[in-house]
Amino acid sequence: SVYASNFLDFSDTDTQGDKITGAVGGFGSNLVVFTERAIWTVTGTGGRVGDILDWNRNRSNAQVGAVSKPSILRVPEGARYTDPTGQTQETSRNSLAYMTPYGDIRLFGSEAFGQADDTIISVPVKDTFSGFNLAARAAVHAVHDSANHQFIWFVPTGTNTVPDKQVVWNYLWGVWYV
């Protein structure tokens, strides 16, 4: 809940000192808030009951958050990807794809098909991310090439402080390109 101070605390015992890296509104009926170590959802009407605003924040079961706001993209329902076991899957609803501090790309919003809420989808290109420069994580960004059904992430590796590698996920076919 939010009190009259108009403050939402996005931390718990596991995420003390974590910082907000991005937020996406209009995800279902939620505001999704990413920190580096967690993903939170905010629901409510914003109405006031006495000194309490009707906002509720809940930590998702995602194991990690996102490196930067520009690394988070909306994924359409029906997007194909390869799960960590090598099986081709298809999203049954809109999701969010994001790059993590672990140097992988995950889907948030996949709970509907019985998996953890941070499914790793970048296994086919994991070697490309092996040299991810975490210190330059704010430089990670992604774009949606809707005409070609692709998401492209630009990532700094080694000692580079600007992106020097890119990976492309074609979500129509469920394949990756480096």
Image (cartoon, helix red, strand yellow):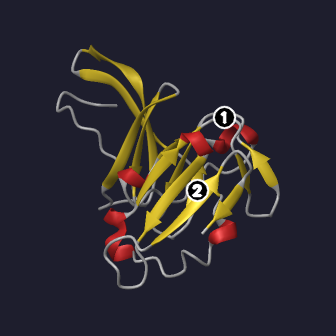
Point out the image quarter for the C terminus. Answer: bottom right
Q: Is residue 66 above or below residue 57?
A: below
The structure residue drawn at horizontal position 66% and vertical position 61%, both measured from the top left corner, is 176
Q: Position of residue 60 (x, y in %)?
A: 53, 45
Label 1 or label 2, whichever lies nearer to me, is 1
> Crowding near pointer 1: few (<14 within 10 Å), some, many (20+)?
few
Q: What residue sits 71% from the left and 37% below the top?
A: 78
Tell me the crowding category of disc 2: few under 14, some 14 to 19, or many 20 or more residues within 10 angstroms, Cα based.
Answer: many
> Which residue is outermost to the front?
147
Q: Residue at the left extreme?
A: 5
- Look at the picture and state if 113 lies above or below 70: above
Query: Which residue sits at x=61%, y=78%?
Result: 127
Q: CA distance from mark 1 to mark 2?
A: 15 Å
Q: Position of residue 151 (x, y in %)?
A: 55, 51
How many marks the image carries: the answer is 2
Q: Which residue is mark 2?
A: 106
Tell me, for residue 45, which label it has, or none: none
* Amino acid type, label 1: Glu
* Residue 99 visible in image: no
The reply, left or right, for residue 19 in relation to residue 61 is left
Q: Which residue is mark 1?
A: 77
Residue 175 percent location from the top left of the image: 71, 58
Q: Position of residue 35 (x, y in %)?
A: 38, 54
- Name the residue type under label 2: Arg
What residue occupies the far right of the structure in this picture?
87
Point out the image quarter for the N terminus: top left
Instruction: Give the structural element (helix, strand or loop) at label 2.
Output: strand
**Dot placed on the residue nearer the N-terminal end, 1 or 2:** 1
Whether residue 73 is visible here, answered yes or no, is yes
Secondary element at tag 1: loop
**Quadrant position of residue 129:** bottom right
